[in-house]
Amino acid sequence: MSAPSDDSLLTPALAKAWGVQASNARGPKPALSADRIIRAAISVAAAEGVEAVSMKRVAAELDTGPMSLYRHIASKDELLNLMVDTACGPPDPDLPSGTDTWRTGITRWAWTLRQRYQENLWAMSVPVTGPPVAPNTARWMEAGLQCLAKSRLDETEQVSGILLISSFVRSETTLTAQIGAAMQRAGTTDALNGYADTLRRVTTPREFPALTRVLAAGVFDADDEPDFDFRFGLERILDGIETLTRD
């Protein structure tokens, strides 16, 4: 793999992550490295939340000065992006498998991505600041494109499809995490605890006829299938994409 050009988006830390910047083989191995900084920052985020991550805080975790981090990581934004890329890791090697259709492959891709996000919920608080340049993020895009390449979509539609599906996965995971955090603060395990009763008290069939029907159907009274919303949303997105793949 060739070294990055002057107009490349690859910073030195990203170049190292991609393996396009050779390390100095001579002399003792440096005590500090981009990988050590990233993993220390992940530990802080996992324990205290991503809002606790700062160059000063991570430097303290590594028992060094903040300026020493900037020799390896250009900025906090770069650190956050590399944290997410490292923590979520690459997709499973069998995505897609030889027996997958485009739909079964991209379905497994979406569920696996959701699982990685759920294992690193702090990552949902990291804003997206640019296109996928980090290596594992690009590998997820590659795996998703390989799934959709089995469809009749052209390359532009494949990229737009991946953006649509990944945005849904991230949005649903973020919403679920926020609801879970609110439940934890309230000391309950039922996200809809008291919600239906409250709505019944403050709404009327005349002003809210559709909502009244939903309440009467008991939709907000129980959460028997916690993954229903994700499954329903993903399947409807794929139904829409499938209309473009028909003769």
Image (cartoon, rainbow, N blue to C red):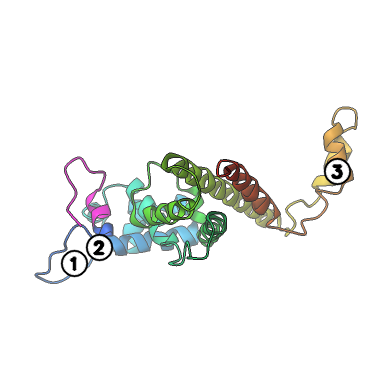
> What's the distance in space between the residues labelled 1 and 2, CA to CA?
7 Å
Residue 209 appears at what percent x and percent y? 87, 32
Q: Is residue 202 magenta?
A: no
Q: What residue would you read off at disc 2?
A: 33
Q: Quadrant of residue 243?
A: top right
Q: Quadrant of the C terminus?
A: top right
Q: Is residue 70 left or right of residue 119?
A: left
Gap between marks 3 and 2 measured at Cα: 56 Å
Q: Earlier in the sequence, mark 3 or mark 2?
A: 2
Q: Closer to the camera, 20 or 49?
A: 20
Q: Overall secondary structure of the magenta stretch?
A: loop
Q: CA distance from mark 1 to mark 3?
A: 62 Å
- Rendering quarter of residue 87: bottom left
Element under disc 2: loop
Give the residue pinned by disc 1.
Answer: 30
Could you tell me residue 72's position as x and y percent? 23, 55
Kindly tell me whether residue 182 is visible in this rendering: no
Closer to us: 193 or 151: 151
Judging from the image, what secondary structure is the residue with disc 1 in?
A: loop
Residue 21 in the image: state x and y as whole percent.
18, 58
Mark 1, residues whose alpha carbon is within 10 Å: few (<14), some, or many (≥20)?
A: few
- Could you say where residue 239 lies in the image, as x and y percent from the top left? 63, 46
- Please identify the quarter of the rendering in which residue 241 is found: top right
Mark 1 and mark 2 residues within 8 Å of each other at the beta carbon: yes
Q: Identity of the amino acid at label 1?
A: Pro
Read off the magenta span: 1-15
For label 2, the crowd category at 10 Å Cα-Cα, with few meaning under 14, some 14 to 19 and many 20 or more, is some
Give the residue type at disc 3.
Answer: Leu
Q: Report the residue marked by disc 3.
A: 215
Task: Give the mark nearest the N terminus, 1 or 3.
Answer: 1
Q: Is residue 13 visible?
A: yes
- Kindly identify which numbered label has been placed on residue 241: none
